[in-house]
């Protein structure tokens, strides 16, 4: 991955809920942290060999620290295990400056925040900002059980506690989230923000779209997605617009892997088509979108794609590289 990095210290690490730890990151002595906005994430370099993206969950007005929450995922590709088992208080980490692909809409009249599990991290940051700015919002937080729900005590002690409703899978049916009722009537000026496991997000976004919510009022950020590749996928070529160089992409190989093998380095993080870090303009050709980052309208435009997961429907893609 190629990117400017920041050196930070892990000044505190704690267990926030069952299978969820939280880290407080602060600048090295004599240095400062870049400001961030609600919905931002940072890329954390782990073990010197791979990078993972984590949302910032603390108040954006806190300029002295970043806070992230990390779920221990049994299907982890190494990131969550490294954070839980290897990172210690006092350790130095390399991170990217904050990036925001999940920003609040400043012209919204009302904000509806929906979080599933560890998806609370960017949503909590949004709530902190909205509460401070006096905006109209409500937050619904769904999780498997109270024991697995992060930041419960923090929310209970916050100034916006009365705007938050918890929904636990193992509790009474009456308290569970009723998406059909909640999303029944799209309202001009009301924007929906959702983050969490893919099944949860698919249910929320599917319900909203079925009820006629305009795509411009739907905002989301996936944490992970399943992208399958196989050797029987059709091969194709990518051409670099800057040099004219043509690079073959084999079946079972990602464009990102093909570029790297040819000595072309671009920024990337998740490698699952969810974070948008590797987003690249397409100048010619038609991509085969496999990502969970672009909206349906953005995918239909076919002028950009995510080379970490997406492929090509045409024999060649000309990339703005």
Image (tube, rainbow, N blue to C red):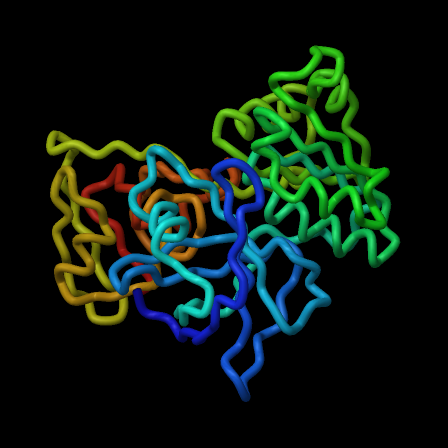
Looking at the rendering, in which quadrant would you find the N terminus? bottom left
Kindly identify the residue that appears in the image at 19 percent across and 60 percent down. Answer: 260
Across and down, in percent, residue 83 comes to: 40, 52
Task: Report the label total.
Answer: 0
* 131 over 286 or under it: above or below: below
Residue 111 in sight from this viewpoint: yes
Kindly identify the residue that appears in the image at 13 percent across and 59 percent down. Answer: 261
Q: Nearer the viewer, residue 133 or 12?
A: 12
Across and down, in percent, residue 103 comes to: 64, 53
Determine whether, in the image, residue 102 is placed left or right of residue 304. Answer: right
Q: Nearer the viewer, residue 122 or 239?
A: 122
Kindly identify the residue that appears in the image at 44 percent across and 68 percent down. Answer: 96
Determine whether, in the image, residue 197 is placed left or right of residue 190. Answer: left
* 282 over 244 or under it: above or below: above
Determine whether, in the image, residue 236 is placed left or right of residue 43. Answer: left
Q: Quadrant of residue 181?
A: top right
Q: Quadrant of residue 164?
A: top right
Kindly identify the residue that appears in the image at 32 percent across and 69 percent down. Answer: 2
Looking at the rendering, in which quadrant would you find the C terminus? bottom left
* 50 over 197 or under it: above or below: below
In the picture as drawn, the residue positioned furthest to the top comes out as: 173
Determine whether, in the image, residue 110 is placed left or right of residue 296. Answer: right
Q: Nearer the viewer, residue 66 or 193?
A: 66
Residue 281 in sight from this viewpoint: no
Across and down, in percent, residue 217 comes to: 69, 39
């Amino acid at each position: 991955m190629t990117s400017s990095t920041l050196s930070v210290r892990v000044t505190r690490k704690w267990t926030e809920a069952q299978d969820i730890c939280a880290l407080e990151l602060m600048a090295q002595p004599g240095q400062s942290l870049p400001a961030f906005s609600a919905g931002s994430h940072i890329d954390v370099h782990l073990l010197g060999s791979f990078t993972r993206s984590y949302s910032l969950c603390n108040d954006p007005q806190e300029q002295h620290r970043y806070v992230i929450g990390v779920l221990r995922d049994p299907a982890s590709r190494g990131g969550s295990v490294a954070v839980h088992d290897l990172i210690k208080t006092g350790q130095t980490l390399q991170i990217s400056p904050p990036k925001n692909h999940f920003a609040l809409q400043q012209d919204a009249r009302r904000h509806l925040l929906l979080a599933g599990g560890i998806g609370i991290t960017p949503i909590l940051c949004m709530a902190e900002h909205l509460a401070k700015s006096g905006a109209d919002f409500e937050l619904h937080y769904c999780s498997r059980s109270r024991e697995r729900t992060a930041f419960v005590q923090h929310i209970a002690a916050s100034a916006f506690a009365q705007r938050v409703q918890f929904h636990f899978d193992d509790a009474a049916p009456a308290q569970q989230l009723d998406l059909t009722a909640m999303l029944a009537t799209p309202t001009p000026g009301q924007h929906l923000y959702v983050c969490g496991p893919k099944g949860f997000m698919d249910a929320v976004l599917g319900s909203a779209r079925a009820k006629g919510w305009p795509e411009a009022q739907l905002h989301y950020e996936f944490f992970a997605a399943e992208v399958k590749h196989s050797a029987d996928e059709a091969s194709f070529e990518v051409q670099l617009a800057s040099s004219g160089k043509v690079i073959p992409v084999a079946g079972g190989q990602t464009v990102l892997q093909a570029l790297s093998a040819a000595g072309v380095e671009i920024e990337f993080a998740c490698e699952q088509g969810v974070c948008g870090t590797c987003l690249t303009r397409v100048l010619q050709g038609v991509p085969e979108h496999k990502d969970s980052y672009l909206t349906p309208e953005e995918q239909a435009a076919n002028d950009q794609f995510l080379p970490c997961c997406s492929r090509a429907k045409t024999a060649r893609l000309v990339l703005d590289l």
